[in-house]
Image: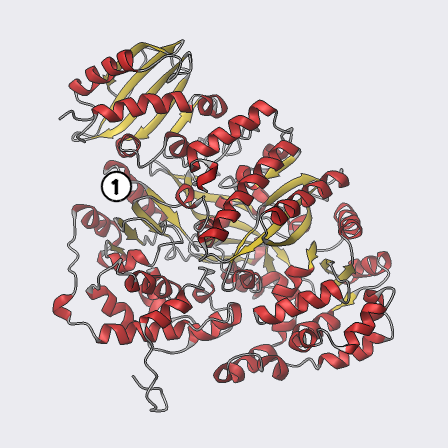
Amino acid sequence: MITKKGKPLEKIGLDAAVKIAEKGTHCGMCRIDFLGTGLCPSGKKHGFLAYWPQGRMELVKHLNEGQIKPTAKLLEIANSCTLCGICDKQCNFATQLRPEKVARALKDYVDTLDTKDLQVVPKDDILRGLCEIVGENWATNDPVIIASYVRSIIPPDAELNYYIVMPETTEQVAQIIKFANTKNIPFLPRSGGTALSVATPTILSNATSLEHGIVIDLLRLKKLEVHPESSSAIVGAGVTSFELQNAASKQKLRANVAEAGAHVCANIATTGVVTTWGNAYGCFADNFIDLELVDMEGNIKHHRDIDISNPYTTDHEFTNISLSPSYVITEAAVKLFPVFDDEDAVFVPFDNLEDALDMVLLLGKRGVGLSVAVLSYKYLAEFICPTPQIAKDFEDICKNYIKLRYVVDVICNKDDKKIVEELAEYTIDHAMLKNMILGSPKLASLKESEFMKILAEEQNPLKAIFAGPMRVHFEKGLDASPEQLAKVYDADLQDFFRKVYAKPEMSDVVWLHAFRILPSRLMRQRMTMGPGGAVWAGDKDHILKWVRMFADVGDKYHLEHALGFISPLDAGKFIYIEYDYFYDHNDPEVASRISKTLLETTEKSLVLGGVFTLINYLFKGIYRKEHVLYPLMKGLTKEEQMMFREVLHSILGEFEEW
Amino acid sequence: MVKFLSDEWIALGKQYMLEQLDPEKDMKHITTSILMIIEHVPPHDTTMNFYLELKEGKVNDFTVNTGATFTEKEAVFIIRGNYGTYKDILQGTLGTALALLKNRLALKGSKMEALKIIKPIDGVIESLRKITDEF
């Protein structure tokens, strides 16, 4: 194999490729064009996950472990990669990984194969039936392709007796479901797969994955229409948040969406759209106007249908748990919101949560801001910093030197900005935020510097750095520029990243909040589990008690943890909290502690009462908030607590086994 | 060889439940009734209905019929699922509670109350598993 310049490329063994692949977390950023590089040509053409960088990384692990035998499809997958380098640029931005090396290893590996030795995968009746529905190219039972779906819908220890099918229309989805029922085969839809990949290393793996059967990959349902006259859009199940936001922004509109790689319809189905923009734009079922869905019998339904059963029915018991969707959303009509010319970002720094919470509750009730949240320093560090090490050093500086523990993060128009500035003693403005993004490597390098030591001695380091005389020196010292930032990347990618960071949007905090490409960094080379939920805004002590509980359990299980965000919703009447635990998804011992943490925080939340937890809102995204949150459950009685444990044990196994 | 849903299987299942299940230890003295509807039963894609009534942990009634409707008895719980799901449960690859929470089984009745009787019902399934060796 040679480079474009004619130099021979270094051979990469499967072992080396696996080391890269193991760090992948199925963030899905390689399936969206968020850096203007275009998309992986192979993935775009063939669709199945195995043809995308993310899928190749998964399947090499199985190949290396001998869990799959080479088939003709493996050759096609390996050779379909043109080594264009797009994946390295995309993945490096989010995770600092080099998936192209994995693709090269795969090419080197298939070069050693004798085509006579390839495993032949015969078609069976099920596959023939699926091919009749979607066409020959879009259904498969090839174990090589199936292996690429492991960890993002198929559990790691499963036998690969699955079918993968990629329908293009709602009608095809309906036919597949009817066919699966007639053949008595279970099925599960897959969109981005990221939520499933978060659950996979934990005890929830078998509970949320498909144990065998048909994976319905919805990527090909790509319908996307923006209707500026009605400020709405029609979105197919294969459309990501980034793609919708991109289309909306061309009409000077904005969608209220999840992280860039999340699929809009799946997000509606799974957790409902709950974002920092929720107070202004709405949450849960506020975000869609109509849905097209296919029920478990294969019937196509719309929310506008007169005879549809009430989709908002719910009960308020803790047993109201769903671990899979009871419908497949194939299309959604969603609301869009105007983008104003005077939008700006303003952050208010705090050294404690209580004061930050006071401000965010007040802003929520007064309806100030378009996007409002309390973020912990860890969130800020992960988002802003280009590498994990820089993020770690940045965190250290925030925590131990400048005492920046929380920020109230507000995206707003000019008038609201004035209100925030009047409420706060000092703020971090857009110019400073831009400098912090582009200057993050320099800032991180100041750890243990004399400057930081002097700053830490100040009575109020935050004020000194953001409002005092030290601000000028601080900003100057950051030496913020695309050139400086690009230097942290591998030598061959520095020129590319210099150009990327020179684009105004890459340091435009408003754009970054809307397009949400930075949260993928929470999953760089390790996993993040973020339980939480909704709670009424009226009882601050209750909120703080709940947050402290998450922290205490994190400490108990020796996990890296931090508050994710707190955002007001529904005119500040309630707030949403995400609390994050970070862990190495390849370490079973840590995964076991995460499992215990997840279950213990859920139980403690239910016992605490007055909260709406992750386990109760999962796969109920289409519910209207009024039905789910009025009333919030009271704390479990002792008898109910025992029952909760029994239910969990019957689903997940005994606690000691976790 | 006893085939799932055959006449022999139904007779044996009833006998096993009556003779082998301990009303206290296995069935926790529960009193309830469940109608299990099994859809897409091969080879003719039919629907079968199992009505199970328990009184103080003892099997009081076990009625089986074939057809899309079952109006003979009114059950506290109605659990609907396809043949494949019931097969997975009987083969032990899928738990009853998990099948409910994964929407593989549709429940009519209180989920809270249904989950309370999961353990005894698992006992019934375990006994049926012992007599089933063909699908």
Q: Residue at x 35, y 60 (%)?
A: A49
| Residue A339 or residue B59, whichever sits in front | B59
In the image, taking residue A487 as reference, residue A49 lies left or right, namely left
Q: How is the image coloured?
A: secondary structure
Residue that numbered label 1 is attached to: A179
Q: Is residue A573 visible?
A: no
* Amino acid type at image mark 1: Phe
| Residue A338 or residue A83, whichever sits in front | A83
**Looking at the image, how many numbered discs can be counted on the residues?**
1
Question: SS of the residue at dot 1?
Answer: helix
Q: How many other residues sit within 10 Å of disc 1, few (<14), some (14-19) or many (≥20)? A: some
Q: Residue at x 29, y 52 (%)?
A: A164
Q: Is residue B97 above or below residue A197?
A: above
Across and down, in percent, residue A510 comes to: 66, 65
| Residue A69 or residue A325, whichever sits in front | A69
Across and down, in percent, residue A383 comes to: 61, 65
Across and down, in percent, residue A649 comes to: 45, 33
Q: Is residue A588 above or below residue A44?
A: above
Quadrant position of the C terminus of chain B in the picture: top left
Q: Residue at x 57, y 58 (%)?
A: A228
Q: Is residue A483 above or below residue A402?
A: below
**Which of the 4 image quarters holds residue A289?**
top right
Q: Is residue B23 visible?
A: yes
Quadrant position of the N terminus of chain B in the picture: top left
Q: Chain of mark 1?
A: A
In the image, taking residue B112 as reference, residue A535 lies left or right, namely right
Across and down, in percent, residue A131 comes to: 22, 52
Q: Residue at x 35, y 54 (%)?
A: A150
